[in-house]
Image (spheres, helix red, strand yellow):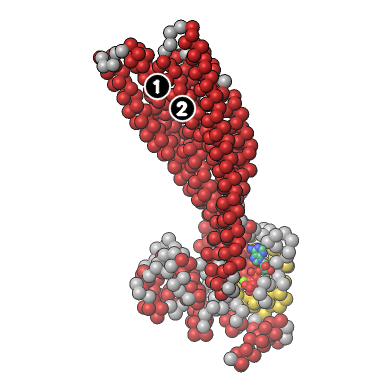
Amino acid sequence: MHWKVFQRLLRFSLVHKRLWLWGLLTLLIATLCDVAGPYLIKVFIDDYLTQGVYISDATLKLLAFYLAAMFIGAAGHYAQSLLFSKVALSVVETLREQVFHAVIHRPVAYFDTTSTGAIVSRLTNDSEAIKELFLNVIATFIQNIVLVAGIFIMMGILDLRLMLVSALILPLIILAMWGYQRLSTPLFQRVRSLLSDINARLHESLSGMSVIQSLNQQQKFEHQFDDTVQQHYLWRVRNVRLDGLMLRALVDFMSMLALAAIVYSFGLTSLEGSVEIGVLYAFINYLGRFVEPLIELTQRLNIMQQSLVAGQRVFELLDAPIEQHDGTARIQRGDIEARHLNFSYDNETQVLADVSFKIAPGQMLGVVGRTGSGKSTLTQLLLRFYPVEAEMLFIDGTSIKDISTDSLRQSVCMVEQEPFLFQGTLEENLRMGQSFSPEELTSALDQVGLGPMLSRLPEGIHTVLGERGSRLSNGERHLVAIARALLRKPKILILDEATATVDSASEALVQETIQKLRGNLTLIVIAHRLSTIKDADNILVLHHGRLVEEGNHLSLLEKRGLYEHLYSIQTAHLVLD
Ligand code: ATP
Ligand code: MG
């Protein structure tokens, strides 16, 4: 499974074939220069120094070679790390773009079941972990394997027997690497999950700060946080202990053994014939150099594992199905019909059951009912945020499934129960990427009665509204959202509780706006305040997802049913007020 993820990630990077090739080439050159160093010094010691020649043309040449090798090596390392970084960063860039594309095209229903935090961490942490794969794993692997191979070849050239002696520690080190891997993986996973707990707790505490402080829960949250942080510390310490023991101490110990073996066999060789002290120097140097990359490889295996897990999570998000709508019909008039509409979010609890109604173009439909009776759900279905069966919901006589997404988004506008404003200026929030003349913008604001507010804002329409429009009051946000919808001249306008958060004066304004709009577009108005929908052409009364009453205000009052009950409670309140 991980192998597939690895292949797929590699494929992402193969777009940059040239960077890869250059990276590999410079890596090879740099490594060759690295291993040439000790060999050159060995030649200097054995062929010149021990012969008593210190400065001569030949030694100067050797020095020049040595310096050149070191310089080219350093330049090569610089170039290769730059090239591999470029590959890594561009893979991350591509992945982030693709994930965001995938996310923003997901059906709205997807976000009911997926936490925002999870998506955010895919886009940030996980893509970052994938970067490590290219930067710190693949490059290091290639580099270290080339280095170790190069070192062995050089050792072989210098002295085959000593090379074989050194090679004896390889299986031991591989065994140690395997053991370390086995022991450290669970520790690592634990540390990772504790870290994500810390993040989650912090995130939750920060977003719920006002609740924590108002309920005086600081101490409890502090305890929880301290607990998690301490756990994280303890597991980290275990991890460090294991690292210290397995990585350094054990491997160092083995390389000491190898060193002793080399010195010993070197001694044996010296009994037989001439001694080349430079060879010993070169071997000790090489031995020191190849242990390091092996330790590094062991450590990198963990990073690799994390990157692949991250890759898998990112791909899961990329591969989740996107709902396709291939309808082509366009909305011309704006009449709506529901026929025995049933709906459930989770295929268990029925949220709408057998709801049938009709609205002619230009008419106003009021929808009332207790909290949770399914009013907002009905509007979500009209926006096709959730799929319904083809023969249940029609606009202009066409099943909502066959309407083109473009036309649907243009013709059906909704002011949500909790309208969302984006970080940006008032103007940007009204335009949302479309172009309107300044007059159109101001007249839309005037229409909803925001003219006076506009003159209060320090920079008028160019005032930045802050995150989620925090600069505005709830009611003002609602009115801005209505203005935003009106600018689009929709055929169907849905107002979900547009008057719930505004004062009576603003409600009157919304009422007036509604009156002005009547006849020009089909209006669906959901309201708890029944005064808002009193003169609707038709009113639906929902109760537990069923349509229990239907008619205009007066006929509903005469029925003396749920509507009349709701209405009498409200008017009683008004009298009390
Ligand atoms: P209110 O007047 O409080 O806005 P409402 O009539 O608009 O209420 P809906 O939002 O339509 O009520 O909710 C109807 C039912 O569907 C509720 O029982 C609610 O728990 C459930 N529900 C709403 N949204 C979802 C969702 N995204 N996933 C699952 N269930 C949901
Ligand atoms: Mg609602």
Q: Is mark 1 within 8 Å of ligand 1?
A: no
Residue 76, image x and y in percent?
A: 37, 30
Residue 477, image x and y in percent?
A: 48, 73
Q: Is residue 215 above or below residue 198?
A: below
Asked if residue 18 shows in the view, the reply is no
Q: Which residue is mark 1?
A: 38
Q: Which residue is depicted at the point 35% across and 74% down?
A: 458
Q: Is residue 170 left or right of residue 388?
A: left
Distance between the Cα atoms at labels 1 and 2? Answer: 10 Å
Q: Which residue is depicted at the point 52% across and 80% down?
A: 502
Front residue of this view, candidates 86 and 447: 86
Count neighbours of disc 1 (C-alpha within 10 A) and say few if under 14, some if 14 to 19, many if 20 or more: many
SS at circle 2: helix
Quadrant of ligand 1: it is: bottom right
Count neighbours of disc 2 (C-alpha within 10 A) and say few if under 14, some if 14 to 19, many if 20 or more: some
Residue 213, image x and y in percent?
A: 55, 72
- Looking at the image, the residue that sits furthest to the top is 273
Question: Which image quarter holds the C terminus?
Answer: bottom right
Q: Which mark is residue 298?
A: none
Occupied quadrant, residue 78: top left
Q: Which residue is depicted at the point 48% across and 48% down?
A: 97
Occupied quadrant, residue 536: bottom right
- What amino acid is labelled 2 in the image? Arg
Earlier along the polypeptide chain: callout 1 or callout 2?
Answer: 1
Q: Which mark is residue 289?
A: 2
Q: Is residue 82 left or right of residue 362?
A: left
Residue 154, image x and y in percent?
A: 45, 18
Q: Are the residues tagged 1 and 2 within 8 Å (C-beta)?
A: yes
Q: Is residue 438 above or below residue 189?
A: below
- What amino acid is labelled 1 in the image? Pro
